[in-house]
Image (cartoon, rainbow, N blue to C red):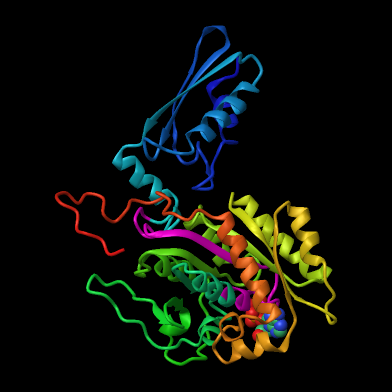
Amino acid sequence: MPTREQITEALKSVIDPELHHDIVSLGMVRDIEIQDGGRVDVVVSLTTPGCPIRNHFQNGVMEAVGSLEGVRDVNVGFDVLSQDEKQSLSQRLGRGGGPLPAGSLAQVTNVICVASGKGGVGKSTATANLAAALFAEGRATAALDADVWGYSIPRMLGVHGRPMVSADRKIIPLETHGGIKAVSIEFFLDSEDQAITWRGPMLHKAIRQFLEDVEWGQLDYLLIDLPPGTGDVTMTLAQLLPHSKFVIVTTPQEAAQKVARRAAETAVRYDIELLGVIENMYGEVFGEGGGQVLADELDIPLLGKIPLTEGVRRASDAGTPIVLEDPDNPASQAFFHAARGIIAATPQEIRMLATPVVAGITGTPLPMAP
Ligand code: ADP
């Protein structure tokens, strides 16, 4: 039979998919007992009693311990971490290490990160146009500019200024084009072209604040324009928003695809669902087909193919995405197609991922506006 130490060692292969650490270093292994006849009992402590990833732990523990020599039977039990234990867990994870506190995005149904392998492929253009297209399709939509070093959402959506702060000290997003909400780092800078030099913890804090301290309200879609590549911001968001989904933007060229694939791999590593690929700038200059190749390779849909046309850039520079300025343009049609693909692939009701804001209210509910 293996020793306790060997079993503990084996349990280090069981990773908490939300906290991204193994259950041993997270202190979630409560008890290990070695019984006669090759049976091992393991008790795992969960952060919440109704933990949806319970099965994940059950299977992981059975596999890890069951593969040790001499083990014939594995019994997995569960209990719940005490308040103190949870606190020390979040300390161990470091500042802002875990997911957001319950309730932060309680009224947001879908969080979609728009990613790319490198800059200049049209990721921000896609974010702005998808936000506008989803809004035009009747969905409550917001765009969060997390591309802190290359923010361009304010320019592309034509929205500038300083947001108001609500009575309970939450940032109110600015609104544009009839109700598309937007938050960008630009809104908090002293001058529009002030350089951002944040790295590491500062950056992490800013991103966290965008999610936690903004009054997003009821949203069908929160689109997040990520910085290119797979740096700090992407990692932070992947940790903070384990339920977010990724859309990958690529140009038709092979080189861009390679980097896009790396972005996709990051999403997979963090257990984030990939919704699909958007190929941007296809046409005579860059050719076409790279998006389809990438989509096939990742086994996800190609959501849309956007042609390279002067109109896309001109509309963005003027602050009105082409889908609003010229909805019949082939590029707009392609963005609408992608937006409908996103709608088809995402839930249309509030997922109970976080505690709803109304929890705990007793008495007669107020009549809600339709
Ligand atoms: P990224 O966010 O990937 O860095 P941007 O969205 O800022 O890229 O796009 C880079 C430049 O290319 C911008 O000037 C934008 O207007 C332009 N652009 C993006 N997509 C297209 C397109 N389909 N046709 C023409 N110009 C485009």
- Which residues make up the magenta segment? 101-127
Relative to 9, say whether 200 is above or below: below
Q: Is residue 239 above or below residue 120?
A: above
Left/right of residue 106 with respect to residue 340 in the rendered view? left
Residue 51 locus on image (x, y percent): 42, 38
**Residue at horizontal 41 percent and vertical 33 percent from the top:** 45
Q: Residue furthest left?
A: 363
Can residue 145 be seen here? The reply is no
> Which residue sits at x=41%, y=80%?
175
Q: Position of residue 160 (x, y in %)?
A: 44, 88
**Which of 164 and 336 lies nearest the eye of the viewer?**
336
State which image quarter holds ligand 1. bottom right
Whether residue 66 is situated above or below residue 48 in the rendered picture = above
Q: Is residue 339 visible?
A: yes
Residue sitting at 55 percent across and 86 percent down? 320
The residue nearer to you, when weighing 276 against 104, is 276
Q: Is residue 183 magenta?
A: no
Quadrant of the image occupied by residue 71? top right
State the quadrant of the C terminus: bottom left
**Considering only vertical position in the picture, is 274 above or below 66?**
below
Residue at figure coordinates x 47%, y 79% from the top left? 184
